[in-house]
Image (cartoon, rainbow, N blue to C red):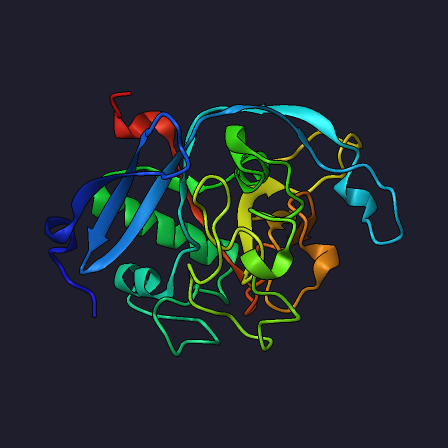
């Protein structure tokens, strides 16, 4: 049920990421007893993508090349059905037996509406991740240990995927986090980004619009196998695609929180 005084029910908490040596505060939000946390990521320069080497690799995942991202905040988890419901007043998900399940069956326009309403409630500026931010965070940012998947070289320990999911979604935070304390960056559901799809090095990156360009989504899902699970793997879909295997994760600009470091 929607409430007219949701903003009055929002409170903020400071927590820390266990893996962060400098203990930059996270920021947590509570809306009608639904809590979610934004994790700080210190930007940097890294090699995005992957150079094709085997038959299992996808040409669009490479070539690897250097990119730089700034500081940003990222959702500790995928957006859950509980959070989506308290903001939007509905739950479009196919698998909906538990509010801690990731929201899915949402297209880009649905997600834009959700983010706009969340911003109205909180007075903050939540947004989609870019593809570059997503991969940097999935790799562990400046704490990266070079894992193939987000947090481990053992896919089963960090992800719900084809061989362990029962071909459905699972509640967030059931698998091990990555180096930044982020859960389900690999597996469970793919995650929409704000980035338009283009082959690396083939053409300029285009900003997607309502009229047509394809959006990148990242991370693999409950139905995908190992080939689709590496942190560098890319996929993409139309703005209207709403399936049971795509959800989203929030981002926010670093300086919007006025954190004292």
Image spot of residue 142 (x, y percent): 52, 28
Identified at 38% across, 53% down, the residue is: 113
The answer to whether residue 32 is visible is yes
The residue lying toward the viewer, choosing from 222 and 142, is: 142
Relative to 159, is 49 on the left or the right?
right
Q: Nearer the viewer, residue 67 or 154?
A: 154
Residue 244 location (% of width, % of height):
54, 70
The answer to whether 53 appears left or right of 33 in the picture is right
Residue under the image location 55 percent in, 46 percent down: 151
Of 148 and 5, the residue lying toward us: 148
- 14 over 167 or under it: above or below: above
Q: Quadrant of residue 33?
A: bottom left
| Front-most of residues 107 and 165 | 165
Image location of residue 89, percent across then percent down: 28, 67
Tell me: residue 149, above or below residue 174.
Answer: above
Residue at the image position 50 percent from the left and 55 percent from the top: 184
Q: Is residue 226 above or below residue 124?
A: below
The quarter of the picture where the C terminus appears is top left
Quadrant in the rendering for residue 189: bottom right
- Residue at x 40%, y 46% (from the top left corner): 75
* Residue 240 visible within the image: no
Q: Is residue 30 above or below residue 33?
A: above
Residue 61: % across, % down: 75, 42
Q: Quadrant of the N terminus?
A: bottom left
């Amino acid at each position: 049920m929607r409430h007219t005084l949701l903003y009055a029910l929002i409170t903020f908490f400071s927590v820390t990421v266990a893996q962060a040596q400098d203990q930059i505060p996270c920021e947590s939000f509570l809306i009608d007893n639904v809590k979610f946390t934004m994790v700080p990521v210190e930007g940097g320069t890294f090699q995005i993508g992957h150079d094709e080497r085997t038959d299992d690799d996808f040409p669009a995942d490479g070539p690897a090349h250097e990119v730089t991202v700034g500081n940003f905040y990222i959702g500790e988890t995928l957006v859950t059905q509980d959070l989506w419901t308290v903001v939007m007043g509905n739950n479009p998900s196919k698998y909906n037996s538990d509010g801690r399940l990731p929201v899915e069956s949402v297209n880009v326009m649905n997600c834009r509406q959700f983010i706009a309403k969340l911003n109205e409630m909180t007075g903050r500026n939540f947004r989609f991740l870019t593809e570059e931010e997503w991969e940097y965070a999935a790799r562990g940012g400046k704490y990266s240990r070079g894992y193939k998947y987000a947090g481990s070289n053992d896919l089963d320990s960090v992800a719900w995927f084809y061989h362990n999911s029962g071909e459905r979604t699972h509640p967030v935070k059931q698998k091990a986090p990555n180096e930044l304390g982020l859960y389900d960056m690999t597996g469970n559901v793919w995650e929409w980004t704000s980035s338009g799809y283009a082959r690396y090095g083939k053409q300029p990156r285009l900003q997607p619009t309502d009229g047509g360009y394809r959006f990148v989504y990242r991370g693999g899902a409950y139905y995908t196998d190992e080939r689709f699970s590496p942190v560098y793997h890319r996929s993409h879909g139309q703005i209207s695609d709403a399936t049971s295997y795509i959800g989203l994760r929030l981002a926010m600009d670093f300086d919007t929180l006025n954190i004292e470091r």
